[in-house]
Image: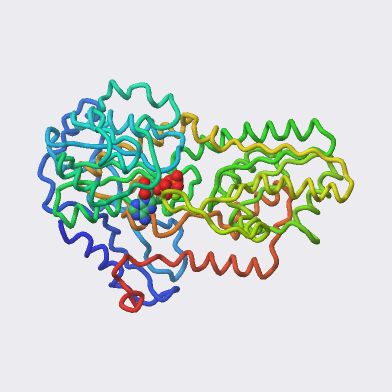
């Protein structure tokens, strides 16, 4: 029903004063869906594979809460629609013309998602018009569409990368929607990170403005695990597992030299999840540096002094650094201006190389013999196929996306508190998932590596305040804080 957006917004307006000046009522957080009620019976009801499932269809009113633990006196929280097949669907099988696009950087599992979208649409909903858009958003208007069939995608999950190709930049909403309209596409599956999901929302809004009956389903991809709301993104487990190999090599190098240092740079532009989990899993790491936790190089309790102490104690050490860590330190020392990629993302300085030079210079002055080996496995990790658990996860995400699009929803799919849910686009793009250094997980890491936290009491207070404010839910566009209270 067409009023779904305003209904969702109403959830924000019907609010009363709470911890943060406003709290949300527990009206389910509705995703956008197409006008008119879905009219077709879901073909799955006659599907032999599902005949044994006791309650296969998801009740419209089933919700997934964003927070499992509700504190005393706090109001009821945000809920999302439960993902899964609906009793009635919006499109007849032979009406569906679906397309799939992958955008942004590579991540293990992209091909599995493509495969499962094609096979799921075909096997569950008898859809046979499925197209692949080549090389990201710009492929909507600058390349031929590929025809995808279960046969053509059968083996692709065993390969890394994306068979469709990907790119940054090139998001021209008008041209993209012109092409969707001209080609009669009515289901658009968009796989990509935060930038891609913002692009998906723009496409959805333009589709809505033109009154087109097109579902847009976003499948969030981020190797960094930095997408908000969802528990975990696909490819993350694979990345952590593969990062172990780099850490193992760094450990061997460090162990085999006198005063050997193995330095590994891992992905994590804004969020250090891969570095944190790889460090916790490995147990060979003596120091883990992430963007969320500032550090300093020199002076009492600085990184260089810690390295010296560790070398004197055990003659070798392993450092893991997330690519986004210490960027402020480098910017200050190089005094260069910021550069951007084609999508407008900030280009990062190479923290690994910078640290290598700084560490070498320090020990040269100290006249202390040491060897440092710097390993950057980023592109090797991004390019591998997904592991078993990510493959299963990709399948479930793809199926959620298909069921949602068939029911006429436009949203992002993901696991919230262990349950598959439909999440409005703006929810996943308005904030970023970050390692909370005020959480127990980071404390566990510090106790596992035995590294200093590098934080002053003032830094710790600031981190706690940031954390408190991060719990304040963002308002949807168009609703001001004043009108909400
Ligand atoms: P990752 O950063 O994980 O590699 P991403 O999806 O964030 O993935 P980007 O290169 O930032 O990667 O964006 C992918 C696509 O989304 C690009 O084609 C870009 O033009 C488009 N895009 C990014 N931000 C926006 C935005 N705010 N509005 C519309 N399109 C956007
Ligand atoms: Mg991004």
Q: Is residue 337 above or below residue 111?
A: below
What residue lies at 39% left-to-right and 41% top-to-bottom?
167
Left or right: 198 in relation to 295: left
What residue lies at 78% left-to-right and 52% top-to-bottom?
304
Q: Where on the picture, by quarter, is residue 2?
A: bottom left
Q: Which of these two is toward me, 346 or 452?
A: 346
Q: Residue 205: where, in percent of width, then height?
A: 24, 56
Q: Is residue 279 above or below residue 385?
A: below
Left or right: 192 in relation to 300: left
Quick one: quadrant of the N terminus? bottom left
What residue lies at 69% left-to-right and 68% top-to-bottom?
457
Quick one: quadrant of the C terminus? bottom left
Q: Is residue 265 above or below residue 113?
A: below
Image color mode: rainbow
**For the image shown, how many numbered marks are present on the structure?**
0
Q: Is residue 127 above or below residue 450?
A: above
Task: Say if residue 196 shows up in the picture.
Answer: no
Q: Which of these two is toward me, 78 or 483?
A: 483
Q: Residue 103: where, in percent of width, then height?
A: 37, 42
Task: Say if residue 84 shows up in the picture.
Answer: yes
């Amino acid at each position: 029903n067409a009023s779904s957006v305003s209904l969702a917004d109403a959830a924000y307006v019907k609010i009363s004063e709470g911890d943060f000046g406003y709290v949300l009522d527990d009206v389910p957080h509705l995703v956008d869906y197409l006008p008119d009620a879905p009219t077709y019976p879901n073909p799955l009801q006659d599907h032999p594979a599902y005949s044994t499932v006791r309650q296969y269809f998801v009740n419209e009113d089933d919700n997934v809460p964003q927070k499992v633990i509700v504190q005393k006196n706090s109001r009821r929280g945000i809920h999302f629609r439960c993902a899964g097949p609906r009793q009635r669907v919006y499109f007849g099988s032979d009406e569906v013309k679906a397309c799939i696009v992958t955008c942004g950087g590579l991540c293990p599992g992209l091909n599995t998602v493509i495969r499962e979208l094609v096979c799921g649409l075909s096997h569950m909903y008898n859809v046979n018009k499925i197209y692949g858009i080549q090389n990201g958003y710009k492929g909507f208007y600058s390349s031929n569409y590929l025809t995808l069939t279960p046969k053509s995608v059968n083996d692709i999950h065993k390969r890394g990368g994306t068979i469709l190709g990907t790119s940054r930049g090139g998001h021209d909403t008008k041209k993209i929607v012109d092409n969707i309209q001209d080609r009669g596409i009515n289901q658009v599956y968009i796989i990509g990170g935060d930038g891609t999901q913002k692009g998906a929302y723009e496409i959805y809004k333009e589709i809505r403005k033109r009154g087109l009956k097109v579902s847009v389903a976003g499948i969030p991809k981020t190797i960094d695990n930095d997408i908000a709301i969802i528990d975990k993104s696909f490819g993350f487990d694979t990345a952590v597992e593969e990062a172990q190999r780099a850490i193992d090599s760094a450990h061997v190098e460090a162990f085999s030299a006198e005063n050997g240092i193995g330095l590994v740079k891992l992905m994590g532009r804004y969020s250090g999840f891969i570095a944190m989990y790889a460090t916790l899993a490995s147990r060979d790491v003596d120091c883990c540096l992430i963007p969320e936790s500032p550090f300093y190089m020199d002076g009492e309790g600085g990184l260089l002094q810690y390295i010296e102490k560790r070398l004197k104690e055990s003659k070798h050490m392993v450092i893991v650094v997330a690519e986004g860590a210490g960027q402020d330190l480098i910017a200050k020392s190089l005094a260069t201006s910021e550069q951007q990629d084609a999508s407008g993302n900030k280009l990062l300085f190479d923290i690994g190389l910078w640290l290598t030079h700084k560490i070498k210079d320090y020990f040269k002055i100290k006249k202390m013999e040491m060897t440092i080996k710097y390993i950057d496995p980023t592109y090797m990790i991004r390019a591998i196929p997904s592991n078993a658990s990510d493959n299963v996860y990709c399948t479930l995400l793809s199926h959620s996306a298909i069921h949602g699009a068939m029911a006429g929803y436009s949203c992002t799919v993901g696991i919230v508190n262990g349950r598959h849910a439909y999440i409005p686009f703006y929810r996943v793009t308005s904030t970023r998932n970050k390692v909370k250094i005020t959480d127990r997980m980071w404390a566990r890491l510090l106790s596992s590596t035995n590294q200093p936290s590098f934080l002053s009491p003032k830094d710790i207070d600031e981190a706690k305040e940031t954390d408190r404010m991060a719990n304040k839910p963002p308002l949807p566009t168009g609703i001001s804080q004043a009108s909400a209270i």
